[in-house]
Amino acid sequence: MRQAPAAGYGATVDTTKHENVLLRREIGEVLRSVRQHQGRTLREVSSQARVSLGYLSEVERGQKEASSELLASICQALDAPLSMVLREVSDRIALNEGVAIPDTVPDELIRQQGIALR
């Protein structure tokens, strides 16, 4: 394992090979975790999100990829900000890839990548 500097976007912290990550699987795991933490059933959330129970179950298991509209509806039903869900998904993927992501975007990266922040 190679240690990287403490700061810096995309700093590699682990050079071991990691399994391929499916975005739909990570999104599903985060949604399920939020729902279970709230003590809610699939039926409750699917009804509030206006999606079939079976489809929501498939999304949670990573078998179906939720559209952006459906994901927003599920997040609203869970009273979980979409940004929080996506941040958790991003953090999980980065961990799997062995990449360290800082809490803020460094000025150097903004200059290098031409990132426009609102």
Image (spheres, rainbow, N blue to C red):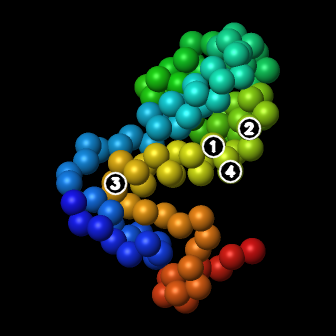
Q: Quadrant of the C terminus?
A: bottom right
Circle 3 sits in a helix, a strand or a loop, which is it?
helix
Q: Residue at x 34, y 54 (%)?
A: 97
Earlier residue among tags 2 and 1:
2
Kind of element beneath mark 4:
helix
User: Is the C-beta separation of discs 3 and 2 under 8 Å?
Assistant: no
* Alpha carbons under labels 4 and 1: distance apart: 5 Å
- Between 4 and 115, the one lying in front of the other is 4
Q: Mark 4 sits on what residue? A: 83
Residue 6 position by quadrant: bottom left
Q: x, y percentage for residue 71?
A: 65, 37
Q: Please name the residue shown 36% across and 48% down the image.
A: 96
**Residue bearing the label numbered 3:** 97
Tally the numbered discs.
4
Q: Can you identify the residue that label 2 sits on? A: 80
The residue at 25%/48% (across/down) is: 18
Q: Residue 46: percent from the left, percent from the top?
A: 70, 18
- Dots 2, 1 in contact, CB < 8 A: yes
Residue 85 — which label?
A: 1
